[in-house]
């Protein structure tokens, strides 16, 4: 995961830095979460709080370990601009899973999400992942439009905490290969 993080960081735009988030960053994560009223209205049963931020920091899919997760902050001039949650090898070994991409409200609609996805897709490809997967809440219509515009295709539907979710996937490498192996 360290190689993926370094590659992702190297592909970020000018003025942006990337680093793992920890307990000490949770107040900034909370501030970012609190600013996204629409997403909160479709994704949460409660107002965001530090406990929710901690849950996101620690959450892992079944069978995954802390070593397979990156909970990253993207910073612009020292201020948290986005949170990116990644898990390698979920639900299949050749898939990099995006558990969360949430932008600070003032950063939305300005190309940051597109730039982050360009970088993440390149980093995932360089790390040998064949696919990038994610779940998007059915009620998050702006999110669905964004993911579809990025070339993600629906591979199924499911439920997350009682909410309908589109399971989306995008092919990164033309030939399946094992993470960490060269795709050349």
Image (spheres, grey):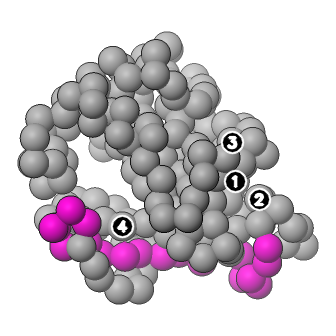
Callout 1–callout 2 Cβ contact below 8 Å: yes
User: Residue, x 50% and y 69% (percent of image)?
Assistant: 133
Left or right: 160 in relation to 155: left
Looking at the rendered structure, which numbered label has been put on residue 5?
Answer: 3
Kindly identify which residue carries mark 2. 127
The Cα atoms of the two marked residues, 3 and 4, are separated by: 21 Å
Instruction: Please say whether residue 166 is one of the residues in the magenta stretch.
Output: yes
Residue 114 seen from this side: no
Question: Which of the two labelled residues, at mark 2 and mark 3, occupies the earlier sequence position?
Answer: 3
Left or right: 70 in relation to 112: right
User: Residue, x 38% and y 23% (percent of image)?
Assistant: 26
Crowding around mark 2 (Cα neighbors within 10 Å: few <14, some 14 to 19, many 20+) is: many
Question: Which of the two labelled residues, at mark 1 and mark 4, occupies the earlier sequence position?
Answer: 1
Looking at the rendered structure, which numbered label has been put on residue 123?
Answer: 1
The Cα atoms of the two marked residues, 1 and 2, are separated by: 6 Å
Q: Is residue 87 above or below residue 164?
A: above
Instruction: Please say whether residue 168 is one of the residues in the magenta stretch.
Output: yes
Crowding around mark 4 (Cα neighbors within 10 Å: few <14, some 14 to 19, many 20+) is: many
The foreground one among 42 and 141 is 42
């Amino acid at each position: 995961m360290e190689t993926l993080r370094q590659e992702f960081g190297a592909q970020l735009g000018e003025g942006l830095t990337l680093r793992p988030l920890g307990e000490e960053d949770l107040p900034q994560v909370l501030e970012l979460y609190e600013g996204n009223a629409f997403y909160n209205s479709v994704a949460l049963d409660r107002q965001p709080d530090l406990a929710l931020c901690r849950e996101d920091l620690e959450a892992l899919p079944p069978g995954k370990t802390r070593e397979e997760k990156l909970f990253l902050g993207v910073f612009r001039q020292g201020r948290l601009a986005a949170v990116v949650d990644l898990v390698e090898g979920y639900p299949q070994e050749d898939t990099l899973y995006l558990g969360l991409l949430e932008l600070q409200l003032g950063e939305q609609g300005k190309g940051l999400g597109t730039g982050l996805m360009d970088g993440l897709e390149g980093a995932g490809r360089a790390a040998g992942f064949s696919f990038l997967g994610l779940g998007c809440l059915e009620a998050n219509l702006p999110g669905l439009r964004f993911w579809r515009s990025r070339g993600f295709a629906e591979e199924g539907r499911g439920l997350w905490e009682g909410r309908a979710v589109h399971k989306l996937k995008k092919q990164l490498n033309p030939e399946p290969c094992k993470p960490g192996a060269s795709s050349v």
